[in-house]
Image (cartoon, grey):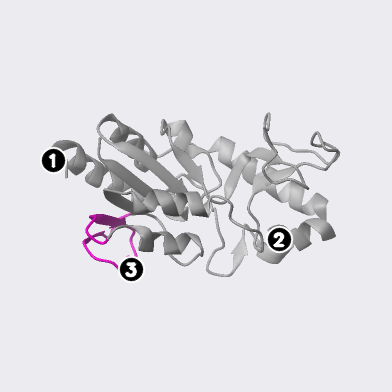
Amino acid sequence: MKKVIVLTGAGISAESGLKTFRDSDGLWEGYNIEDVATPEAWARNPELVQDFYNQRRKSVLEAGPNAAHYALAKLEEKYDVTIITQNIDDLHERAGSTKVIHLHGIITRSQSGIKANLTYPIEGWELKMGEQCELGSQLRAHVVWFGEAVPMIETAAKLCAQAELFILVGTSLAVYPAAGLINYIPRDVTKYIIDPNIPTASNSRIVEMPYQATVGVPMVVDELMENDV
């Protein structure tokens, strides 16, 4: 089967009611990023950071996949699909996608405060202060904070280099290193860009789809399922 790489950003989750990144005013759900999404914030006020992610987790669990998520899952019937997402929710998995790489972690898991790759599932939405990993460190949300390394970026780059078809959904290509992944896609590969505001991409064979994810993704998937592009 043809190898399809999909890179998704905040736009696909926004249509499920989730604000997964900062708004135009520079805030994320009313908070300064520096106060809730950095290692320094965790060291300064872990209770605030823990509560912030508990509330985000609660919102994720209350939300559901939308038409774009389900369309990408359907694409697996005919293609070898890997989704690389910048989002920390689990909506791709809940829609049925089986190969999902989370560049910035996934909020439904916790991680050790001293060993990032030591992670655990979270039952329910609340991760409490005092809950520790097996090494005795306080558990925190399994989310990559500003200033931390993005451990899955090299894996994602290698997958992009193997793409035979590429779909970009709901991202402005403004957040690095994720934004640089499009540069690993071979130049002769067709690239669908689905977003109301098409980002500038220095690549070739681009098909621009200036639509919301729930409109544009089903359109592209229907075309691919019918025509085997």
Q: Is residue 187 above or below residue 226?
A: below
Is 22 covered by the magenta stretch?
no
Name the residue beneath numbered marker 1. 227
Q: Is residue 120 above or below residue 151?
A: above
Residue nearer the viewer, 110 or 67 = 110
Residue at screen point 49% across, 47% down: 17
Residue at screen point 29% across, 58% down: 186
Query: What is the spatial separation of the Cα atoms under label 1 and label 3, in whole angstroms?
Result: 25 Å
- Circle on res. 166: none
Task: Give the main secondary structure, helix, strand or loop, of the magenta stretch.
Answer: loop
Determine the image quadrant of residue 148. bottom right
Name the residue beneath numbered marker 3. 201
- Disc with the residue nearer the chain's start (1 vs 3): 3
Amino acid under label 3?
Ala
Magenta segment: 187-212
Name the residue beneath numbered marker 2. 38
Across and down, in percent, residue 227 comes to 13, 40
Determine the image quadrant of residue 188. bottom left
Other residues around mark 3 within 10 Å, as few (<14) / some (14–19) / many (≥20):
some
Q: Is residue 19 above or below residue 55?
A: below
Q: Is residue 25 above or below residue 222?
A: below
